[in-house]
Amino acid sequence: MKRRSWLAALFMSAAAGLTSLPSLAQDEAPDAMVKRLSTEVLATIKADPAIQAGDMNRIIALVDSKIMPNVNFSRMTASAVGRYWRQATPEQQKQLQDEFKTLLVRTYAGALRQVSDQTVEVQPMRSAPGDEDVVVRTLVKGRGDPVQLDYRLHKTPGQGTGWKIYDLNVLGIWLVDTYRPQFAQQINAGGIDKLLQTLSERNKTNSAS
């Protein structure tokens, strides 16, 4: 679980460089983009003493300001909530996105401090030139055996970045698939409001820890 946590943090951090060189990202192939961003962000993390020391405020600011804007969070949240998403009011949908975002930031920000000597190797892509929804497969190499870390991205013309990440596969398990049954259990127990309450309470607990 700990290993999966820092790998998921690497997924979140890999989007951080998207705010730089926007014109390049617009035309860049998704596999080339993941390789470049992973390399740049890993170097940044390794060179930042505050992150290495576990400065949570600095880590959260990095994730929240630079990473989250480059993830299609509406799509990610809707996928995690599943068929119940359409039952939520627009206000509830916004609250779900806010609480889920806070949950991910708090959950994975702390794992960034575990990054040390890792490198990322991007695998050959299996996609056609015109595809707008792709999977970029990578191997994270460091101490021990290489670890699978895959990204789902889709093209977003007119939104500035060209590609946005909306799911992650860590060690064979997709992030959205991990949360969907947990969310469904809460919704079945008390509706959308029950899920919102659970997420809010969990975020308060994470904030206090």
Image (cartoon, rainbow, N blue to C red):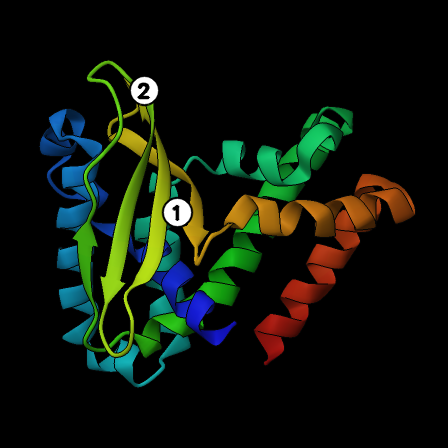
- Report the front residue among 186 and 68: 186
Reply above or below: 40 against 81: below
**Which label lies toward us, 1 or 2?**
2
SS for dot 1: helix
Give the residue type that dot 2 points to: Glu
Q: Is residue 148 visible?
A: yes
- Report the front residue among 161 and 135: 135
Pinpoint residue 189: horizontal percent, then vertical percent: 90, 48
**Pointer 1 residue:** 68
Pinpoint residue 153: horizontal percent, then vertical percent: 35, 33
Q: Residue 51 is drawn in which quadrant?
A: bottom left
**Pointer 2 residue:** 132
Residue found farthest to the right: 189
Give the residue type that dot 1 points to: Met
Q: Which mark is residue 4?
A: none
The residue that appears at 70% across and 58% down in the rendered structure is 200
Pinpoint residue 80: horizontal percent, then vertical percent: 62, 41
The residue that appears at 90% across and 46% down in the rendered structure is 190
Left or right: residue 114 compared with residue 166? left
Residue found farthest to the top: 130
Residue count near mark 1 (Cα–Cα under 10 Å), binned few <14, some 14–19, many ≥20 = some
Q: Residue 207 is drawn in which quadrant?
A: bottom right
The residue that appears at 13% across and 25% down in the rendered structure is 27
